[in-house]
Amino acid sequence: MGKTRPIVTQQASSKKKSDSWTFFSNHTHVLLCLYRDPDILLREVAIEVGITERAVQKIVAELEDAQVVKRTRIGRRNHYAIRKRSKLRHPIESHRSVADLLEFVH
């Protein structure tokens, strides 16, 4: 007798595929959260952005490596300072700064 395979069904999503994208990346979303509340917990950022806490930690580390964010330990918490003079990374917008982005979106 042959093995039977489980039937896999795909759930219909209430959102269309075209509704699933956004104009800004998760890096931008994380940066905006840190800008609005420099003492926010990364767990709270994850909830707000809709990604895992581990993904937020990776993004913050990348923003630190790029010298866009400076993390300072204060007691048991972190404080995040945005380096607004940092230039945006893509060649299309590299003539603009992080401050320009924050001013535009916030």
Image (tube, rainbow, N blue to C red):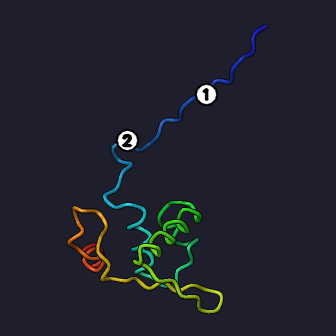
Please report the residue visible at 40 percent of the width from the left and 77 percent of the height from the top: 68
Residue 76's place in the image compared with 11, above or below, is: below
Q: Tell me the SS state at disc 2.
A: loop
Residue 78 sits in which quadrant? bottom right
- Quadrant of the image containing the C terminus: bottom left
Of residues 97 and 14, the one drawn nearer to the viewer in this rendering: 97
Image coordinates for residue 66, horizontal then vertical, percent: 41, 73
Q: Which residue is mark 2?
A: 16
Q: Which residue is mark 1?
A: 8
| Residue 53 vs residue 10, the one in the foreground | 53
Q: Is residue 9 above or below residue 23?
A: above
- Closer to the N terminus: mark 2 or mark 1? 1
Left or right: 57 in relation to 19: right
Residue closest to the far right: 1
- Above/below status of 98 relative to 78: above
**Residue at horizontal 79 percent and vertical 7 percent from the top:** 1
Q: Residues within 10 Å of mark 2 (few under 14, many from 20)?
A: few
Residue 70 placement, left or right of 101 = right
Estimate the x, y position of residue 63 in percent, counting from the top left.
44, 72
